[in-house]
């Protein structure tokens, strides 16, 4: 049984908890009532807000739609106005472009083409939208007029700026193939760049919009005429120079000699050409003492012809490069074929005439004249690949013209070898025929070129010598060992040694004749320069071709012999400076003791030495500046050696006289500083100085 006190405490505890729970329940009930009131208030507010939003939407949406419609209408009006302006502009095109079209495109091609584009768009508009309108005929007529003026401008630009390439520039261009040390490439500018761009622009428009191919015919006709005129101009220039100087430059010498001057001064292209003209000495003439005026004319024609062949290849390549920028690709080959026909036909006709002349020479037994075929044939064959490459894509009849000419020349052959050797030996010493600047004589270039041409036909030449039973003449011993060889091997070896002896005989005859010719010069120094140039030319020509191999078959020391001859002539030339340097020696120079003065006689001795040196230096430099040493290496070597000798002697002389008061006007006698003397000597053998 639970005690009464515990029950009572338990009851009180329960009553207190109940009271607390009732208070909590009452608090929750009050809060729920407040929450309900707040919820009802919020619902009322939201309902009111929703109502107001609906009223606002009902008011704004009609305004928005009305504004949107108004904007759309405004845009339509603007577009309509623009279209109207655009359409109206087509009706004004003829009037707006009238002045520019009438005045033509000259000087304002871009503006003119812009007007043509407007007219073309107007034509397209009226054709699509109003084909019966009179405005269509107006803009069509204006478009055709504009096209005609563009075609006329195309023709006018070509006619006005298409000029024949100057002969000197052509020579500079084709000489690049024969020279090793080329310092600056020669560029042929057929048309000024700005003019070319205008022509390209017009051609592109005529192709794309003009629907006209007549401009291609205009192009090839004008450029064909200029190509032919360029070659004829070169021929006339060549003949004029050969007639005035008797000395010609020929690219037929294909050995790429280093002794040809390679200085290319764009400001003075004429000098470079004229110097080369003197250097190569009419490489194709076959006069050799027995020729007539008619033969001389033929020689000039042949030399000119070789120039023109090289010029044609170069110019045709330039024309094709130019054509590719103007003519559409699918018309380029045909247009190029037409463009080169006139010049090519003229060259082939001239080649046929040379063949006919050589054939007539054979019939009258003029064997030296027929040898003119060799350099042409050699040149044509060596340039055939480049020629074929240039004509690639042309018609078969065009490409076959050169092979036909080569075949015709190959049928002529070579005949008079012994007569040529005799003519080298007997060539007369003509003073007027001697190069005034001491450069390579025409006889030397003729002989070397002749021998080089024999290399192309060495088998034929050797067989010709053997057929004439020249073994006894050249004292060719028969090697017993060869008797055991096959017949063909024996014949080949024997002919090779026979041809080697023949070449050595020609070179021997040439050396004797050059020695005789050198005596024509009154100045022994010029005579030495002349022999030096010729010996050096011969040696370099032998070294740069297979000739040296043939020569050494029977003459083992040939190369060394020529080097000794060259050194000997350099020594002979250097003696000419003794009359200058002898004034700088110690002979008769007074010895000045400390505190003493020079006597009048002693002062005069020093004055005479200065005067003798100055006068001698000026005289030699004036004379020798006009002489020529084509080989740059030799020229620099001789200049350097002479500068050192003279400069060292002059410096020593000035040092000895430095403290001697021999005149009140020292500048009168001490005219040149050592550096100035060296500069004067550096200008020797330079006609441009």
Image: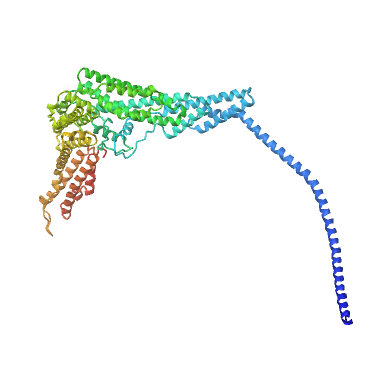
Q: Quadrant of the C terminus?
A: top left
User: Could you say which quadrant of the image residue 99 lies in?
Assistant: top right
Residue 627 place in picture, x, y as percent: 21, 37
Task: Please name the residue shown 83% across and 56% down the image.
Answer: 45
Please tell me which residue is depicted at 59% across the width and 23% down the height of the picture: 137
Image quadrant assignment for residue 432: top left
**Residue 161 as seen in the image, left or right of residue 308:** right
Residue 270 versus residue 499: which sits nearer the camera?
Answer: 499
Horizontally, is 340 left or right of 112 in the view? Answer: left
Which residue is nearer to you in this view: 115 or 615? 115
Please state the total of marks drawn on the protein image: 0
Q: Left of 78 or right of it: where is 333?
A: left
Q: Is residue 687 above or below residue 387?
A: below
Can the viewer see residue 673? Answer: no
Q: Position of residue 200 (x, y in %)?
A: 46, 31
Pick the front one: 411 or 444: 411
Image coordinates for residue 578, horizontal then vertical, percent:
14, 44
Residue at 84%, 62% in the rendered image: 35
Q: Closer to the camera, 547 or 363?
A: 547
- Residue 47 lies, with reference to residue 298, above or below; the image says below
Q: Where is the N terminus found, in terms of image quarters? A: bottom right
User: In x, y percent, where is residue 604?
Assistant: 12, 49
Residue 424 in sight: yes
């Amino acid at each position: 049984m639970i005690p009464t006190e515990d029950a009572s405490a338990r009851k009180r505890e329960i009553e207190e908890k109940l009271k607390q729970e009732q208070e909590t329940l009452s608090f929750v009930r009050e809060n729920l009532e407040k929450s309900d009131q707040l919820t009802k208030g919020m619902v009322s507010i939201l309902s009111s807000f929703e109502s107001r939003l609906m009223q606002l939407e009902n008011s704004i949406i009609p305004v928005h739609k009305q504004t949107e419609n108004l904007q759309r209408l405004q845009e339509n009006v603007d577009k309509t106005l623009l279209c109207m302006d655009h359409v109206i502009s087509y009706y004004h095109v003829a009037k707006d472009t009238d002045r520019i079209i009438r005045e033509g495109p000259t000087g304002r091609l871009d503006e003119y083409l812009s007007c043509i584009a407007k007219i073309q768009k107007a034509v397209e508009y009226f054709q699509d939208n109003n084909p019966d309108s009179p405005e269509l005929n107006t803009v069509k007529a204006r478009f055709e007029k504009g096209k005609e003026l563009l075609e006329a401008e195309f023709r006018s630009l070509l006619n006005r700026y298409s000029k024949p390439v100057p002969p000197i520039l052509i020579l500079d261009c084709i000489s690049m193939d024969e020279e090793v040390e080329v310092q600056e490439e020669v560029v042929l500018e057929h048309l000024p760049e700005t003019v070319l761009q205008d022509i390209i622009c017009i051609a592109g428009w005529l192709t794309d919009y003009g629907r006209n191919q007549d401009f291609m015919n205009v192009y090839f006709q004008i450029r064909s005429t200029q190509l032919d005129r360029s070659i004829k101009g070169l021929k006339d220039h060549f003949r004029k120079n050969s007639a005035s100087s008797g000395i010609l430059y020929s690219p037929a010498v294909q050995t790429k000699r280093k002794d040809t001057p390679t200085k290319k001064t764009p400001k003075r292209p004429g000098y470079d050409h004229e110097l080369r003209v003197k250097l190569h000495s009419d490489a194709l003439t076959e006069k050799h003492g027995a020729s007539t005026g008619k033969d001389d004319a033929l020689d000039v024609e042949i030399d000119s012809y070789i120039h023109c062949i090289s010029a044609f290849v170069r110019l045709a390549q330039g024309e094709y490069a130019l054509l590719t920028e103007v003519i559409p690709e699918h018309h380029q080959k045909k247009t190029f074929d037409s463009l080169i026909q006139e010049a090519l036909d003229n060259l082939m006709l001239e080649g046929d005439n040379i063949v006919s002349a050589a054939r007539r020479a054979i019939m009258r037994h003029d064997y030296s004249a027929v040898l003119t075929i060799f350099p042409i044939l050699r040149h044509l064959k060596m340039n055939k690949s480049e020629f074929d490459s240039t004509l690639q894509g042309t018609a078969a009849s065009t490409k076959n013209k050169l092979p036909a000419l080569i075949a015709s020349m190959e049928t002529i052959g070579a005949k008079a070898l012994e007569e040529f050797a005799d003519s080298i030996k007997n060539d007369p010493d003509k003073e007027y025929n001697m190069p005034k600047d001491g450069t390579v004589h025409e006889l030397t270039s003729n002989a070397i070129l002749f021998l080089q041409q024999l290399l192309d036909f060495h088998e034929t030449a050797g067989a010709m010598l053997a057929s004439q039973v020249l073994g006894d003449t050249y004292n060719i011993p028969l090697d017993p060992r060869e008797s055991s060889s096959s017949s063909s091997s024996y014949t080949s070896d024997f002919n090779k040694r026979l041809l080697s002896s023949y070449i050595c005989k020609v070179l021997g005859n040439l050396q004797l004749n050059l020695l005789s010719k050198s005596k024509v010069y009154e100045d022994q120094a010029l005579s030495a320069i002349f022999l030096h140039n010729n010996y050096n030319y011969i040696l370099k020509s032998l070294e740069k071709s297979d000739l040296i191999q043939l020569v050494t078959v029977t003459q083992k020391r040939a190369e060394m012999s020529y080097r000794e001859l060259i050194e000997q002539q350099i020594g002979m030339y250097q003696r000419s400076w003794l009359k200058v340097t002898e004034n700088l020696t110690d002979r008769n120079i007074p010895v000045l003791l400390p505190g003493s003065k020079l006597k009048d006689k002693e002062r005069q001795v020093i004055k005479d030495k200065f005067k003798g040196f100055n006068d001698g230096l000026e005289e030699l430099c004036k004379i020798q500046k006009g002489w020529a040493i084509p080989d740059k290496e030799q020229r620099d070597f001789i200049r350097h050696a002479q500068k050192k000798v003279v400069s060292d002697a002059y410096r020593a002389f000035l040092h000895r006289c430095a403290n001697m008061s021999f005149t009140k006007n020292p500048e009168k006698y001490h005219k040149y500083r050592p550096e100035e003397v060296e500069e004067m000597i550096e200008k020797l053998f330079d006609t441009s100085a």
